[in-house]
Image (tube, helix red, strand yellow):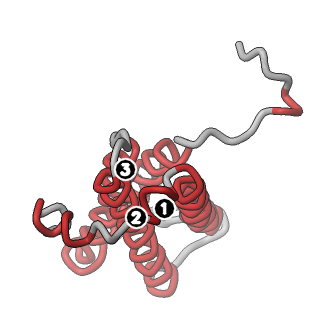
């Protein structure tokens, strides 16, 4: 139990990792309901985008910033998580346009409520990652203010993905 009163509780800074894990799990569940003929066209790419959001969120969370290169690497992973969430949103939009949905979700179909929950989860991930990036900018601003670490990062091969 927390000693912090409920009225003073705030969102945890690592909520973006938990949300990314839930988003991946939900994406996998929804992908199982899609027609098999979509496997190589859309389903596989959608699940991969959700997996990459989770991978980059976990990678960013695992970095303990002690220098400018660490700060850049963390920012890189957060940017990647955000970008893959954008890709995932595009795929979900495409699915919604092409795959019929019913209000009740009966049969081999994704319900409209599931689509709505999916989109809300993606939107939540956008907001959480952007919030962490803004928080990091305040916390690690001194590292970003120094000379560009892009050359150092390139020499270390950090951004060759």
Q: Which mark is residue 89?
A: none
* Point 35% across, 69% down: residue: 147
Is 11 in front, or is 99?
11
Displayed quadrant of residue 44: bottom left
Q: CA distance from mark 1 to mark 2?
A: 57 Å
Provide the secondary structure element on which disc 3 rests.
helix
Q: CA distance from mark 3 to mark 1?
A: 39 Å
* Precedes in sequence: disc 2 or disc 3: 3
The image position of residue 95, as x and y in percent, is 44, 79
Q: Which residue in the protein does label 2 denote? A: 146
* Residue 102 visible here: yes
**Residue 137 in the figure: left or right of residue 150:** right
Q: Which mark is residue 60?
A: 3
Q: Which residue in the protein does label 1 denote? A: 107
* Point 31% across, 62% down: residue: 47
Is 120 in front, or is 99?
120
* Precedes in sequence: disc 1 or disc 2: 1
The image position of residue 139, as x and y in percent, is 55, 49
């Amino acid at each position: 139990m927390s000693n912090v009163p409920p009225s003073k509780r705030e969102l945890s800074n690592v909520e973006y990792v938990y949300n990314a894990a839930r988003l991946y799990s939900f994406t996998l569940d929804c992908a199982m309901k899609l027609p098999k003929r979509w496997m190589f066209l859309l389903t596989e790419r959608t699940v991969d985008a959700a997996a990459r959001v989770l991978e980059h969120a976990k990678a960013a969370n695992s970095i303990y910033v002690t220098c400018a290169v660490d700060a850049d690497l963390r920012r890189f992973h957060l940017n990647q998580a955000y970008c893959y969430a954008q890709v995932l949103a595009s795929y979900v939009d495409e699915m919604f346009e092409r795959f019929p949905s019913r209000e009740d979700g009966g049969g081999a179909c994704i319900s409209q409520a599931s689509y709505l929950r999916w989109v809300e989860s993606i939107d939540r991930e956008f907001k959480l990652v952007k919030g962490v990036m803004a928080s990091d900018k305040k916390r690690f601003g001194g590292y970003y203010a120094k000379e560009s670490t892009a050359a150092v990062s390139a020499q270390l091969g950090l951004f060759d993905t």
